[in-house]
Image (tube, rainbow, N blue to C red):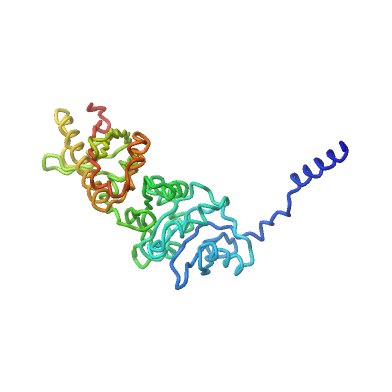
Amino acid sequence: MRNWMQAAVSLLLAAALCGCGAPVPLKEKLIVEGIAVDAAEAGYKATVQAYSPAAEGGSRLFQATGGTVFEALRNIDVQVGKQAYYSDARVILLSEACLRAGLWAALDFFIRSSALPAGVPVAATVGPAADLFAIESEAGDQPAAVVANLLQVNRSGTVCGALYRVGACLQTDAADPALPLLGTVQKQGKRYARPAGILCFKGQTPCTRLSRGEEWAFRWLCGYADDRAYPLTFRGTPYTVTLHRVDRTWRAAWEGDRPAVHIALAVACDIAEAASAHKVAAAELAAFARALEADMARRVTRTLARVFAERRCDVFDLGRVLRQRQPARFKGLADWRQEMPRCRVTCAVTANVARVGQGAVTE
């Protein structure tokens, strides 16, 4: 009996070490750098940008259709005669047209697949998603890399577009997903990628777009600073401010039978005085900070009023905050989406402003 058990253990170890099947040689893999999904007449059209050293530019595009995204991608494997390798994928692009059938239907394969990096950025596109794989690059980079870098530099992919975050939002009733929105622009006969705002969802359905101005407030509410210069008019003079840090805190409560959330934003920033014809005097620095605080609070309040209260779209995680801080009261709500217009949301901003090279700081 003992010898039989030893033999069985040896066989199991040998199987574990050797594997159940031979590995796929590299030359038989389709190394995918980017994936684009568009609507087709009956289902979806998938486009992949794949590594191909023999092709001009070092990559090729392959397309196929299918009733589901999985079927479309599988048909590319059949068409090319190679097994797709997704671990090097830089970006997933989904057209607004294909998203009308539901975000989960478009992302189901990617969320369930263990072959894709969990942090790969996901973005929606204004036109056909495949068009983003036909853009130009001044540096000669591949389109998938250009788009991924654009999302990273623009912070949109970091804020809301990571695959794991979108998947988490789809599996809760306390928050709605949002995706960075991209488009293309023609310059001197060439096509380039451009940011086009944020696409917000109500559940799985596209609900509204955030304008480029509302995108500021969205990022602050997500706790991210912004690399773009923020414009502010102070005492009739235009200035720009660079935000370096945004610290966000929440306070959730119930006012009678009405849910309430207070948001406090603490920001650290510099005044870009070189771009203005006027300088901010040291004596005016405190007043400048108060003006910035009021301007930021107004922008956040307007964005929340339109998207959260009017459209009943919770891409700001307010429902998640209430659930975490007041779980019993939140559980007692019949329908969180119906409660959104009744939820009282306030925002206060505290700005710590510095003058570049002069070290003057407001507290």
How far from the left and from the top, in percent, is residue 204? 39, 56
Q: Which one is in front, 54 or 214?
A: 214
Quadrant where the C terminus lies? Answer: top left
Residue for point 36% across, 68% down: 189
| Residue occupying the far left of the picture | 236
Residue for point 29% across, 38% down: 243
| Residue occupying the far bottom of the picture | 41
Quadrant where the N terminus lies? Answer: top right
Q: In this view, does 328 lie to the left or right of 78?
A: left
How far from the left and from the top, in percent, is residue 355? 24, 32
Q: Which one is in front, 75 or 170?
A: 170
Q: Which one is in front, 127 or 16?
A: 16
Q: How many numbered badges does the structure rendering display?
A: 0
Residue 101 falls in image quadrant: bottom left
How far from the left and from the top, in percent, is residue 343? 25, 42
Q: Can residue 344 be seen here?
A: yes
Above or below: residue 66 compared with residue 362: below
Q: Which one is in front, 129 or 56?
A: 129
Residue for point 36% across, 38% down: 323
How far from the left and from the top, in percent, is residue 252? 29, 34
Q: Can residue 141 be seen here?
A: no
Q: In this view, does 351 lie to the left or right of 111?
A: left
